[in-house]
Image: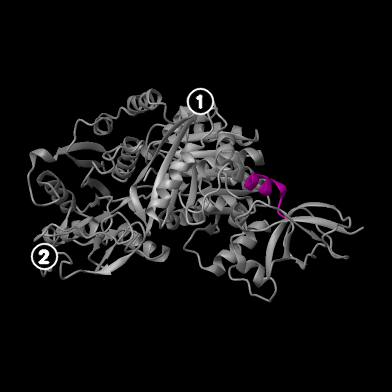
Amino acid sequence: MMKKVGVLLPVPLSQVYDYVVPEGMSVDVGDIVLVPFGSRRLYGVIWRISDFAETSKPLKQVYDKFDLPTIPGVNLEFIEWVANYTLTPLGAMLKLMLSVPQVFKALKRQSKKLNKILTPYPDFAPIHFSSAQELAYHDLKFRLDQGYSVSVLDGVTGSGKTEVYLELVADVLRCQKQALVLLPEISLSPQMIERFTKRFGAQPSLWHSLLTPAQRRETWKQIIKGEAKVIIGARSALFLPYSNLGLIVVDEEHEQTYKQDEGTIYQGRDMAVVRASLNHIPIVLASATPSLETHYNCRQGRYHEVSLENRFGGASLPEIEIIDLKEYKSKEWISAPLFDEITKTTSAGEQVLLFLNRRGYAPLTLCSACGTKVECPFCTAWLVDHRIQGRLVCHYCGHAVAKLKECPSCHANDSFVACGPGVERLAEEVASRFSHLKYCIISSDLIANVQELDQVLSKVKNNEVSIIIGTQMIAKGHHFRNLTLVGVIDADLGLQGGDLRGSERTYQLLQQVGGRAGREQKPGKVWLQTYYPDHPVMQALITGERAQFIEQELLMRKYSSMPPFSRLAALVLSGMDEEKVKQEALRLLSVVPKDTDIEILGPAPSPIYMIRGKYRWRILVKAPRHYNLQKFLKLWLYSIKLPSIVRLKIDIDPYNFL
């Protein structure tokens, strides 16, 4: 008897479309097929199968089945779970999994394999643990054998967390299973490739946005076929069709870059925990500064905590000093005490990292004659001076213009001045005040790909530069043997603006960047330039009282009923018609269901009111921690139809409040 199949397509719809299977074609749930869809031919995944019965409306036939392994059911279960949680169309989630259309085109023609997969050997180069690492490993190994568990590997910077979870990866390889290691930054890939290759004698498979289409195609096929055993990837690697996943590691689990804010919105770390649960496998969350949510889950007994309290090999944690900028009035960005310390460190043949988490030359350009600030025409944001590239750039929409010679308001010539420092301006000062020293800048604007990054990092490791100037791209994960001094030019960035996680993020970032210093036998120092030396973040850093800082932050969250003690959802309405967006936001508020457990904040204009020419209004929904927020939002949002000129973005568990 002929079969009818329901096929899910990678389009932003949740509907499964029915097709009839031609005679002679054998299919299973999870097979990838080619089907007609309107005037197009699309690939999709068989979601269900039933016996075919004649209907009043004739069904179209499946064209073809691709010569690929069937996607295991747990992968489909996972994308369905995420779709329901994030209120995202199921087809949009499938698109994340089938994210390489070239795979299916290439299967129709003969294509040579681009890269031969080498088998990683779990016993190639075993790691020799310290006693603390040994205890941590055996604690985690016990849970590896128990099925699903969430373990938090909480270790100070330089404690050897990576080596511990590398041995867990080795255990998974011995069981002929796949291991996924998620990284928050592509910049960490080169050194991770090196460490994994040294340990297992073969390069891991990579998955991130800078791969070429051909590289993505080959990696995708190797993963679904089970040929790729160790995968290192960005958050999107979570949705690949693994054939036999045995372990997930989320490195630097606290990083906000695990949150996808555009397109299909999700929190990569949290969805990784869900994936591990559905696969019945362990997951390890590794960090020197775990998030407050993770600390809370450990306290509640949901997660198991494993600690590494000391650096590997007897190295000491860096000494942290505060420079109160109110006491040092100067036109330079490097204060006198920091200048002296840089001179002392470089004279000893050691390296310095100057950290400033601000890209470009200056964040603001204004006319000295009339005060006009150079704004982006499409966003409520200033254009940032990128002097090396000779452009003014908007960091929200990417709009760029050549450097202006005449003020558009008062027509004064050469009247523009730069306000505030970025890494390029800091580099200009370094070149002037330390002209005898070589330096490099590590910033995403100036490094086009992983190969260029690898070249710059090699120069640092080979002591070809004395001073490294960097943004958050250099703040975590890197191990530079000769780096003994970290100078933070503006430690206050991130503490203004009312961000819910502002203090937490600043503490994590400064702790991480400070952890680059003194990772070998030479002791390290960290100097923080700040106007707020008494701020709780600064005090926690210099005293080392992390537990007290976490306790204070959790108490403030509890007092204000904010996550992790409540749940949030952000609704962002946007469109080109300013008045229409406002009207629809107010209309949406007028039909909100009555529920005493729900608190509605707004609607109000977004802090960044316009992005890419679209005006934006926000509504924040707050609910108790165990409340079914998705059910409430469905009841509310499905009761009203917005005009096509107004877009609604739903962000469950928002991190960005701009």
Q: Secondary structure at mark 1?
A: loop
245 with respect to 577 (left or right) = right
Q: Nearer the viewer, residue 610 or 73?
A: 610
Magenta region: 71-80
Res. 415 mark: 2
Q: Is residue 250 magenta?
A: no
- Quick check: 251 left or right of 443? right
Q: Residue at x 61, y 42 (%)?
A: 84
Mark 1 nearby-residue class (10 Å; few <14, some 14–19, many ≥20): few
The residue pinned by badge 1 equals 597
In x, y percent, where is residue 526? Answer: 23, 41
Residue nearest the observer in this picture, 29 or 640: 640
Amino acid type shown at disc 1: Asp
In the picture, measured across the screen, residue 592 lies left or right of residue 255, that is right
Give the farthest residue toward the right.
Answer: 1
The mark nearer the N terminus, 1 or 2, is 2
Residue 28 location, quadrant:
bottom right
